[in-house]
Amino acid sequence: MRRNTLLTSMGGFKKNKEIADSSPKIFLLCLSAMYLDTPSLLQNVASSGSSTAAIQQAIIDEFCNMRIAENPHPKPPQAQEIVEDVDPEAAAKAEEAAQNEANWAVTVLKEDFEIHNADEWKEKLQWLKKEGHRTAFQEIDTMVTQQFPSAKSAADIQAPPVSEGEEGESESTPSLPPNLDNYFAAKAKLRTKNLAGYDVAQYIWILRLGYNAGYVEIEDAWDLGQQILYMAIQEMQSHRDFCSGYFAGYIFDTGSTEMTVHHNACATLLTSPVSPWGVYGWLG
């Protein structure tokens, strides 16, 4: 029998409670990414009451039942923990639910991120940690700033003319980036130094999916969470930086500017007295 079937996307309630108590910064980072990705999950926290204990319990409960309702791939019913001495029928159902959840995660990884196996999953996490969308954005930003300093939109930028070689043959010149429209839209939204907020959120989402898919054990998954925590603290100074980088990165990556629910989620997280951001403060 495989390891205890999943109660959540990142381990059972007991394990998440241990993480929340012993490594609150990692827990908060994962929670922050989850709420920005899926704003509908904020409603349970908003009704949890005002005491710190009630807030912590509510966010742990939410983290232990996270579902990506807005994802185009509906998540199957969550598996229940397998305990010792359960009847065979119940164990079989739990095992089937765990397999369904694993299949769901594999599908999302493949269709949304072109990740087909554990090696590609690890490579994607490494890329998000070391380079990510923030590096691609910065490369375009440097090119625009140096070569087209007065440009306000993609329409203001034209590809350089093709030059001729010594024998009259045309020499190829580097083409302009295909996502200039996304760059300018993201640039207008960015209020911090880079897109780290988006890279962190996507890293955590892919990390959770990889755990669901069986690519990593729970202890190693939280170790990987620790690694992105270090990057987050280095690249961002506040939750506002997190929001700004997330919004700009989302636009740069997808081209979509329809983010009303995400903006509302950020506003709630920044101002609500029962927000985990208010209770626990910034990561650094």
Image: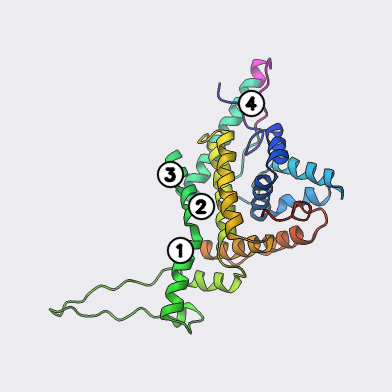
- The residue labelled by disc 4 is 94
Q: Residue 53 location in percent, x, y?
A: 83, 43
The image quadrant that residue 92 belongs to is: top right
The location of residue 148, given as percent across then percent down, is 43, 81
Q: Which residue is drawn at 51% across and 69% down?
A: 182
Disc 4 marks a residue whose amino acid type is: Ala
> Toward the viewer: 181 or 243?
243
**Cα separation between marks 1 and 4:** 43 Å
Q: Is residue 112 visible?
A: yes
Q: Distance between the residues labelled 3 and 1?
A: 19 Å
Per the image, label 3 sits on a secondary structure element best described as helix
Please state, as top left, top right, bottom left or bottom right, where the C terminus lies in the image: bottom right
Point out the stretch of residues depicted in magenta. Answer: 79-90
Q: Nearer the viewer, mark 3 or mark 1?
A: 1
Which label sits in the foreground, 3 or 2?
A: 2
Using the numbered discs, state the Cα–Cα distance from disc 3 to disc 2 in whole angstroms: 14 Å
Q: Which of marks 3 and 1 is nearer the N terminus?
A: 3
| Amino acid type, callout 2 | Lys
The residue under the point 72% across, 52% down is: 40
Which label sits on residue 136? 1
Q: Earlier in the sequence, mark 1 or mark 4?
A: 4
Q: Residues within 10 Å of mark 3 (few under 14, many from 20)?
A: some
Name the N-terminal-most of marks 2 and 1. 2
Viewer-nearest residue: 103 or 30: 30
Q: Quadrant of the N terminus?
A: top right
**Residue 120: assigned label:** 3
The furthest residue to the right: 50
Percent x, y of residue 87: 68, 15
Marks 3,1: beta carbons within 8 A: no
Q: Is residue 82 magenta?
A: yes
